[in-house]
Image (tube, grey):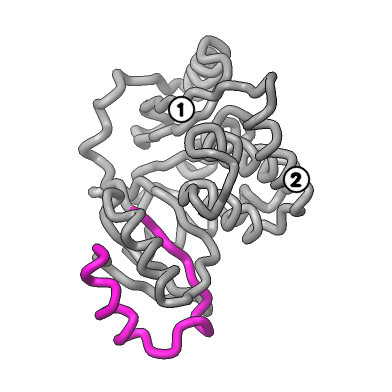
Amino acid sequence: MGRAFEYRRAAKEKRWDKMSRVFPKLAKAIQIAAKEGGPEPETNGALRTAIQNAKAQNMPKANVDAAIQRAVGKDAEVFHEMNYEGKGPHGVLVFVECATDNSTRTVANVKSYFNKVDGALVPNGSLEYMFDRKAVFELKSEAVVNQEELELELIDAGLNEMDEHDDHIYLYADYTNFGSMANALEGLGIEVQKASLERIPTSPVEFSEEQMLEIEKLIDKLEEDDDVQAVYTNIA
């Protein structure tokens, strides 16, 4: 998982460094969580996670509170979570997760991004088997006194794998164990920097630098779209 992990992490950090892109996506995640499970983080695990992730990206508390208020207001927007799958330049496989209040607009935009690079959307479900859906938790290494003990504590909660990179520890579990992992870490008093459900390629493919330049054009366009919450590929 090393090289693929490093690429995904570096790519995500590179593209999420502009607050003008990050905050609207984080706010939308907070709105969706608050709308579905209520505005109180104490009783809404999904909202706690969304707020936690927002704090990790230095999103101001005022923005967080505003997003929650928008979710419970009389004129609250209703967002629908939608996925799109496609093939891009050089056969790269792309899985796009969206949250939108206008599916017609979103699908038209996503389709146009693929078309501009001679790619195309494929029927939903076509790429599901090409990705493992994982719950991923990021901790600061300094927050963990004994990694072996932590690993043993989390096995019953569903932990599959633990990696350490650049003073951070990454925990992986099946997506169905997201809640049990979150509760276990909370019970242990360990602060989670970020928590997410990610799609990790089952058969990563290597591409040349030239090919990556073309592929990046598609990924950048997708991630610049306000309706797109996450983009996953089979890049090694």
Which residue: 54% across, 23% down? 113
Residue 187 position, x and y percent, is: 41, 72
Name the kind of residue labelled 1 in the image.
Answer: Glu
Residue 140 position, x and y percent, is: 53, 76
- Residue 147 magenta: yes
State whether residue 149 is above or below residue 170: below
Residue 84 position, x and y percent, is: 40, 25
Q: Using a 10 Å C-alpha cutoff, classify the residue at mark 1 as few (fewer than 14 neighbours), some (14 to 19) or many (20 or more).
A: some
Q: Residue furthest top?
A: 104
Work out whether mark 2 precedes mark 1 in sequence or the reverse, and give the earlier one: 2
Q: Which residue is mark 2?
A: 63
Q: Quadrant of residue 156?
A: bottom left
Residue 1 position, x and y percent, is: 31, 63
Find residue 81 and name its label: 1
Q: Would you say residue 204 is visible in this rendering? A: no
State whether residue 68 is above or below residue 145: above
Q: Nearer the viewer, residue 165 or 29?
A: 29
19 relative to 192 in the view: left or right:
right
Q: Nearer the viewer, residue 216 or 2?
A: 2
Mark 2 secondary-structure assignment: helix
220 relative to 175 in the view: left or right:
right
Label tally: 2
Q: CA distance from mark 2 to mark 1?
A: 22 Å
Q: Nearer the viewer, residue 64 or 197?
A: 64
Q: Using a 10 Å C-alpha cutoff, classify the residue at mark 2 as few (fewer than 14 neighbours), some (14 to 19) or many (20 or more).
A: some
Which residue: 38% across, 89% down? 146
| The residue stretch that appears in magenta | 135-158
